[in-house]
Image: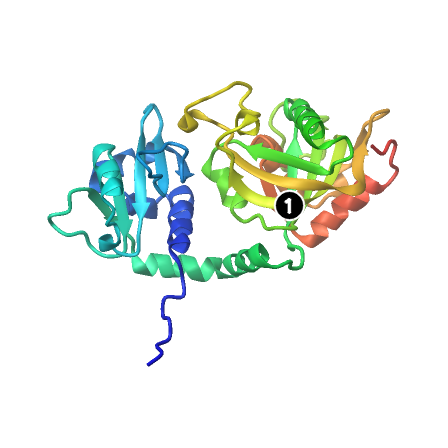
Amino acid sequence: MKKLNRNAFNEKLIHRYYFETLYLDKKERINLVPPSLKKRMKDLNLIVPEDVKSFKNYRADFSLYFKNDPKFYPVEVKWKTSDLKKNNQIDALRKNRGFLVAFDQPQENDIIDCATINKDHFQDWLIKRAELLVEESISDKVETKYGSGKWIVVCRGAAFDNFDKMEQLVKRKFGNKTPKRFWAHKNSRFVMKNMLNLRLGDELLFMFVKDKGGNQAMSALSNNDLQIFRAVLCKVTEPYYMQLDGEKSTFFEGKSIANVGERKWPHFYDFSINKDEDYRFNKKEKVINRKLIDNNLKRVIAESANQGGVLQSLNELQMEDLKAMIRTNIFDKG
């Protein structure tokens, strides 16, 4: 008899669920750690998948880092508690404050801490994320159409220099004509909400701006002119990932930080600059009259700028409007 394989998902799916829920769901994530850690979840700083921290022939599924705590908590995520069988894994978890996460209830004689996944919450998450997960799975195996997402990053201040330094590093490694680029964002739940929705081929606009109203927080309702010094239209070539080692891993930190849990800029993505779509207004900044911009788009621009240049989603009309403004009366094309 040939039975149908009824296990349609592999373990990586629940790893993805665990990672996203810890970052984005402040209510449910408390249930995904053992009782001893519930009160500490407000201080959770970083969730690192397959951390470079290793034990004897073993690397945990996740390492949890908390504020003001130099040590980390290793985590194994399984479908059921009995799937954790290897002695080296069990010993590493037991001796290093680690724990197991699974769908079933732990046995009374379990020698390590456990947390239980709520099946209904997992199912709701899967329904909401199904389209993205399917697209990512297919695009990982075969070439597919480009993503349809539209994103903007509005940079002020130090971001100007960071972008230039990043380009110098990339060109040194891959040559002056390479379109390859990378970027990172500061660690926060606000940042991760959009970072985890990036897709391969999504359209991305970097705008380097100055508000004529001054250097204070940009008002979403302001009609002050917006000075644009550079605008770069790109395609996402590698959606969200963590860079844990190498020169790039601490590039935006400004110094070497050995402890992964102390890093402030761990969240990366790669992109390529579209041909002839790097606009540099060197002779005279380009001024956009914000009275001509609708209130929703002004809010998006202000939120990105005020949050340190975070990713913000645009609809197709907003992206086309911004492109038209940028491409009109170009002073100097880089």
SS assignment at label 1: strand
Residue at the left extreme, as displayed: 109
Q: Can you see residue 221?
A: no
Query: Which residue: 36% across, 57% down?
Result: 122
Pinpoint residue 116: horizontal percent, then vertical percent.
25, 51
Pinpoint residue 281: horizontal percent, then vertical percent.
82, 29
What amino acid type is highlighted by mark number 1? Thr
Query: Which residue: 57% across, 29% down?
Result: 248
128 displayed left or right of 314: left
230 displayed left or right of 246: right
Pinpoint residue 215: horizontal percent, then vertical percent.
65, 22
Instruction: Tell me which colouring the rendered structure shows.
Output: rainbow
Work out which quarter of the rendered image holds the N terminus and state it: bottom left
Q: Which residue is nearer to you in this view: 226 or 230?
A: 230
Q: Can you see residue 18?
A: yes
Q: Residues within 10 Å of mark 1 (few under 14, many from 20)?
A: some
Residue matched to label 1: 237
Pinpoint residue 22: horizontal percent, then vertical percent.
38, 43
Q: Which residue is nearer to you in this view: 51 or 309?
A: 51
* Quadrant hosting residue 232: top right
* Quadrant hosting residue 217: top right
Above or below for 277 versus 175 = below
Residue at the bottom extreme, as displayed: 1
Q: Which residue is nearer to you in this view: 294 or 100?
A: 100
Query: Which residue: 22% across, 43% down?
Result: 87
